[in-house]
Amino acid sequence: MQYLIVGALAGALTALITVKARALTVAAALEAVVIIVCSCFFGGWFGLVFLLLAYMTIAVVDHFLKGRTENIFGGMNKKSGPRDFIQVAANGLPATVCIVLYGVFEHRAFIVGFAVALAEALADSIASDVGVLSKKDPVSICRLRPVPRGLSGGVSLLGTLSSFASTVFMTLIYFAFFRNVGEALAVLVFANLGCLIDSVIGDLFQEKLSCKACGCLTEKKSHCNTPTVHASGIKNLDNCSVNIISNVLCSAAAVLVLML
C-alpha cells in the first residue's frame, strides 16, 4: 500500500508539472500517471526512481534544447509540440509490461527488461535531441550517405556519444541499487542494441515522404503548405512505431537472455 500511495502522489505531481509546462498533453499525462503508479507499486523505490530519472532527463534536455532544435524537427518530423498519448506509450508501455511481470513472477530478468526499456527510450531521445546539433550532417546508418538533420536513420558522432553516455548513466543507477555486475552490463548492452535497432529500422523501413514543392525528404504529411508524397519505406510506419518496435525487441531480448 505504501508504494501505491507514493506512486499515486508522484504520478499526480508529474502530471501537473508536465501539463502546465506543456511537455505532455492531458491524455499523455494521465497515461504517465498509470506508468508511474505501476512502476512504483511493482518495482518499489527502484522502479519509481529509475523511471523518474529517465523521464526527467528527457524533459530537461528537451526543455533546454527546444529553442535550438524545434525548427529542425518542426520541418522534418511528423509530430511537434507536447508529447501525446502515442508517444508516451511508445516509450513507456514495454517498461510497464516488464515491471508488472516482475511483480507477478518475481524473476529478476523482468526488472532488467524494465531498465533496458527505459534506458533505450532515454538514449534514443537524447540521440535525437543532441545529435541534430552536430556541426556535420548525419549519415544514414545503413547507406552511409549524408541525410537531412532530424530524419530517422541518420546518425552522428555527437548523437551516438550522447546516447551512449545516457545508457552508462542509467546502468550506474541500476548497479547502485542491485550491485549486480552481470545485470548492469545487460542493461548497458541491450539498451545500446535497442538504439542500433531503432536507427536501422528507421533508415531502412520507416516511411519517408517527399515535398513536391522543395523536393526535400521529410516525415510530415505536409511540407511547404503542400501535401507530401511517399518516397520510400513502409507506408504509415512512423517514428512512434519504430520506437516501440525497437523498445520491445531490446527489452524482450534482455529478458530472454537472462532467463536462459
Image (tube, rainbow, N blue to C red):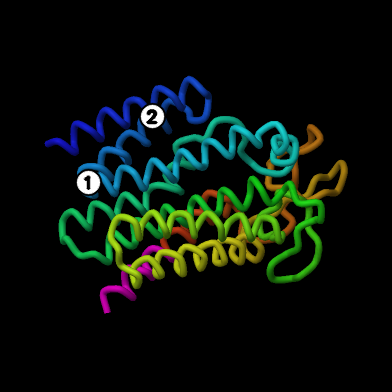
For mark 2, does the 10 Å Cα neighbourhood hold few (<14), some (14 to 19), or many (20 or more) residues? many
Query: Which amino acid type is shown beneath numbered disc 2?
Result: Thr
The residue that appears at 21% across and 48% down in the rendered structure is 42
Query: Which amino acid type is shown beneath numbered disc 1?
Result: Gly
Q: CA distance from mark 1 to mark 2?
A: 17 Å
- Where is residue 36 shown, x and y percent of the image? 31, 39
Q: Front-most of 229 and 120?
A: 120
The residue that appears at 58% across and 49% down in the rendered structure is 126
**Range shown magenta:** 249-260
253 magenta-colored: yes
In the image, 57: left or right of 217? left
The residue lying furthest to the right in this view is 214
For mark 1, does the 10 Å Cα neighbourhood hold few (<14), some (14 to 19), or many (20 or more) residues? some
- Quadrant in the picture for residue 143: bottom right
Task: Please report whichever mark, 1 or 2, sits nearer to the chain's N-terminal start.
Answer: 2
- In this figure, which residue is indicated by the disc labeled 1? 44
- Quadrant of the snapshot with the C terminus: bottom left
- Quadrant in the picture for residue 89: top left
- In this figure, which residue is indicated by the disc labeled 2? 14
- Where is residue 135 shown, x and y percent of the image? 81, 51
Label 2 residue SS? helix
The residue that appears at 61% across and 62% down in the rendered structure is 199
The residue lying furthest to the top in this view is 20
Q: Front-most of 28 and 184?
A: 184
Check the image and report above or below for 248 versus 15: below
Label 1 residue SS? helix
- Where is residue 99 shown, x and y percent of the image? 27, 53
